Amino acid sequence: MIQSLLRKQESDTDLALAQFRTFSKQIPLLYFVLLANMMALSWTHWYVAPVGLTLIIPGILFCISIVRLLVWWRPSSVRVSSDQALRRLRFTLFLVVVLGASFVTWALSLYPYGDAYHKSHVAFFIATTVISCIFCLTHMRAAALTLTAITMIPFTVFFATTGNQVFVAMAIDLILVVVAMVITLITHARDFADLIHTQNELTDRQAQTQELSDENLRLANMDSLAGIPNRRSFFAELQKRLDHAKRDGTALAVAIADLDGFKPINDAFGHLTGDKVLQVSSSRLSRAMGPNMFVARLGGDEFGIIIEGERDKEALQSIAEDICQMLSQPIVFPDISVEVAGSMGVATFPEAGQHAQTLFERADYVLYHAKQHRRGRAVLFSTEHARDLTTLSQIKHELHSSRWEEEITVHFQPMIDSDNQRILGFEALARWDSSRLGPIRPDVFIDVAERSGIIHRLTEVLFSKALAAATTWPDDIRLSFNLSARDVASRPVMERLCGILARSDFDAHRLEVEITETSMMRDFSAAQTNLRMLTSLGAQIALDDFGTGYSSLSYLHRLSPDMVKVDRSFILDIETNPISRDIVKSLLDLAHNVGCECVVEGVESVSQVLILRNLGCRLMQGFYFSKPMPEDELQSFVAAHASNDAAGGRTSAANDRPEPTEATIVNLPSAREA
Ligand code: C2E
Ligand code: CA
Ligand code: CA
């Protein structure tokens, strides 16, 4: 039974360790009791028993006990492996057998010496020693039971056979006491084992909970699609590394990379391909990270990168350019190969800012710059950008005051039918000469207004002013008004614009709203529904900057605009570049085929006019005809044009297009004035 107890104990290493720890604190006490009892017994028998029994044997037992006491006394004995603990428990069991038998044999061998008192002391010695040893061995049930058996059997047999009534009673008494103790011991041992198991279960469960929460934390910080850290983790890492950089005085750069051309791929090939492009780009970025770099997906097709320890601007530029180039490598799938261009904005600590948010915003600002002017390249935030930002924040500040509502005006640029020199209409273009900041370019303040949420109010003010001017024009002249992407996306704004239009005296059929591809991109169907509010009143739709976007064709098809406006960028080198000419020709044909009008923008010279006319283009707009002009100049422009028309400069009939010559074209009022 004892063997089975020990085996059970050995199979349960956690329990063995716990027993070992508790029990090792009690063992020195056990030896103390043993030594004290032994010395007392030797002392009382000193003169009555032989020296071998009072000095030599107790001396040997004394030495062994002292050694064992010291072994257990050492604090290191508390920290042992489960194997060591088991080994020591087994040795303890062995010692219990050997020492228990030795002590009992020694004590009983003293019995024949001395008087009744001496004999009683022997019984007392065995009884107290056994009880206290069982007590000290409570946590090692196997040892306690072994000791009980080894001592109690000889004791009982010995004293029961003395025939002395007192000793027999003592033997019976001790057996009863020991039985009670053994029961207590077994119960205690069971409770102790239960306690340890419960404790271990709790620890296991705690570890499982910890593991789970670690996994949750990992997932919360990972982008499940890209398999790299996510936005949340990026900002946590940025803050951490920025704190280090501040403390150690090291350099740090924040970069934001963006995939140009991702959206059209997503639109054209579907989300699965889009997802794969993101995964490939993510893994390319991951592989490109050096030991002091960190990459995360910020969302969409945007990635954040932290570069530590590189102070040299040229080196940083080259790292960033390498990453852009790597992102721009074709991505080959079994059936298709696609290409995106990686643009990047980089802001360095401490030059570009001290705080994580500032650095991020500045990197984002130059990324925007890169996308606008240096697609597929990296731009580092510089002092020039800082100056621009200051200006932008001043503009933003001014836009938050209401002064601009007075200061802002609308200029008008004519669209001309080059067949008969008729003014088709005027495009309203915003102008702002701020009393505090001076003249500000419309693309600049419109962009600020869009970013700071003022665009809706700005559009409404401009629309009212443009309509007020246009009501004074002759009935056959149209008004073209630019709408920002945010206007088109907002139903309340479009409702308000409809209200303004309805309240004005301007005939809605003479209105044309110019929208760009980007304004339709975010939510096409919402934008289309919103635009329908205006078209149901009679307004027409022009697709602006036609040909510059990725999906011009798709929008032409889905939106069926009344007019497209070919972007100025195609006209710039039309005199020297046959490809530009081919592109313009294709765009004109395209518009013609879908039955919508086509205005070519940015016409600056007579030779451009001649080339365009040869390509079949009638409707044009540009500095050649007139720069955008204020309302008061517009009246005289219209009048001069009308008189020029009336003078019969050309004998044009609608279906009888005159051959364009330099002479006929320069006959326009603006061209003459220029
Ligand atoms: P846009 O709608 O493409 O307007 C045409 C721009 O080209 C105008 O610039 C015009 O002055 C310019 N332009 C016209 N002909 C020529 C030419 O022959 N050569 C050159 N180099 N440029 C020419 P502007 O007025 O500076 O406006 C820039 C942009 O600002 C506009 O581009 C439009 O996107 C935005 N914008 C202007 N006014 C408004 C407005 O009232 N509302 C909204 N949402 N945007 C506006
Ligand atoms: Ca326009
Ligand atoms: Ca345009």
Image (cartoon, rainbow, N blue to C red):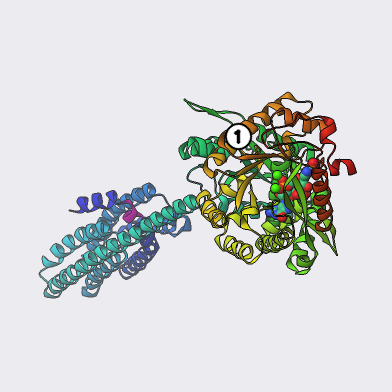
Q: Residue at x 62, y 57 (%)?
A: 508
Above or below residue 401? Residue 444 is: above
Which quadrant of the figure contains the C terminus? top right
Residue 15 sits inside the magenta stretch = yes
Left or right, 125 with respect to 546, comes to left
- Dominant SS of magenta comes to helix
Dot 1 surroundings within 10 Å: few (below 14), some, or many (20 or more)?
few
Q: Residue at x 26, y 68 (%)?
A: 131
Query: Residue 134: x and y, percent?
Result: 27, 65
Residue 33 sits inside the magenta stretch = no
Q: What's the amino acid at mark 1? A: His
Magenta span of residues: 13-17
Q: Residue furthest right?
A: 673
Above or below residue 648? Residue 540 is: below
Above or below residue 34? Residue 216 is: above
**Is residue 439 at least partly visible in the picture?**
yes
Please state which of residues 238 and 264 is positioned toward the viewer in this rendering.
264
Q: Residue at x 61, y 29 (%)?
A: 329
**Is residue 114 at least partly visible in the picture?**
no
Q: Secondary structure at mark 1?
A: helix
Please state which of residues 85 and 432 is positioned toward the viewer in this rendering.
432
Image quadrant of residue 206? Answer: bottom left
User: Is the CB atom of the residue marked by disc 1 within 8 angstroms of ligand 3's nearest atom?
Assistant: no
Residue at mark 1: 592
Query: Residue 583: x and y, percent?
Result: 67, 29
Above or below residue 403? Residue 541 is: above
Query: Residue 260: x and y, percent?
Result: 62, 39
